Image: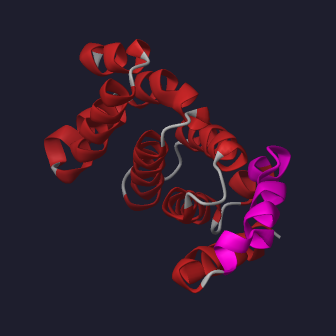
């Protein structure tokens, strides 16, 4: 965790991207997935500031990491881990709010992570609402980029998440 935190603290785009991709890949195997879950607070704290990064690869890797944690919350023994949900929703809200509309892959991953966390969870839906996620999703829906044929899945995901949040 220390090496990953050091990468996050360096601020260099290449280091941030490498540390985030390494963190994402921890979810591929059981033993490292368990470690990533145990180190969740430290990792997400270290990488939270990447939500406002100007580097598209960094934002994309952060969105992938958040999606991995969201899936972990839904599928494994951590389904009732409110702390993970709070931390993920907070970073997702910041990432959605700061991500440029042309970064459709990052926005799509954010929508999938949000939907994964909020579906069937009234507390997560309420928290997402409190964090202003609906406004960020409306911005996505209204963007020309989301309406482009190649970004159809983003528009559909954003609409689906808005329906879940209601």
How is colour applied across the structure in the image? secondary structure
Q: Position of residue 64 (x, y in %)?
A: 41, 51
State the residue at coordinates (58%, 44%). 85
Asked whether residue 133 is drawn in magenta, I would say yes
**Residue 105, above or below 39:** below
State the residue at coordinates (79%, 44%). 131
Total numbered circles: 0
Q: Do we see residue 160 in this rendering?
A: no
State the residue at coordinates (48%, 49%). 63
**Residue 140, above or below 144:** above
Q: Position of residue 8 (x, y in %)?
A: 40, 21
Q: Position of residue 56 (x, y in %)?
A: 48, 46
Q: Quadrant of the N terminus?
A: top left
Please identify the quarter of the rendering in which residue 139 is found: bottom right
Residue 121 as seen in the image, left or right of residue 13: right
Q: Quadrant of the C terminus?
A: bottom right
State the residue at coordinates (56%, 42%). 88
Which one is nearer the viewer's eye here, 80 or 7? 7
Please identify the quarter of the rendering in which residue 5 is found: top left
Residue 20 as seen in the image, left or right of residue 111: left
The magenta segment: 127-147
Asked whether residue 66 is drawn in magenta, I would say no
């Amino acid at each position: 965790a220390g090496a990953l935190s050091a990468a996050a603290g360096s601020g260099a785009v290449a280091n941030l991207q490498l540390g985030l991709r390494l963190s994402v890949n921890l979810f591929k195997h059981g033993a490292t997935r368990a470690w990533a879950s145990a180190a969740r607070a430290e990792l997400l704290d270290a990488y939270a500031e990447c939500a406002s990064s100007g580097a598209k690869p960094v934002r994309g890797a952060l969105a992938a990491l958040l999606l991995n944690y969201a899936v972990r919350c839904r599928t494994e023994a951590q389904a009732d881990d409110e702390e993970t949900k709070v931390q993920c929703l907070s970073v997702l809200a910041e990432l959605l709010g700061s991500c440029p509309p042309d970064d459709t892959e990052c926005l799509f991953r954010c929508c999938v992570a949000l939907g994964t966390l909020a579906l069937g969870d009234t507390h997560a839906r309420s928290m997402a609402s409190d964090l202003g996620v609906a406004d960020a999703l409306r911005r996505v829906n209204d963007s020309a980029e989301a309406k482009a044929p190649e970004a159809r899945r983003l528009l559909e995901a954003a609409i689906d998440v808005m329906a879940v949040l209601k």
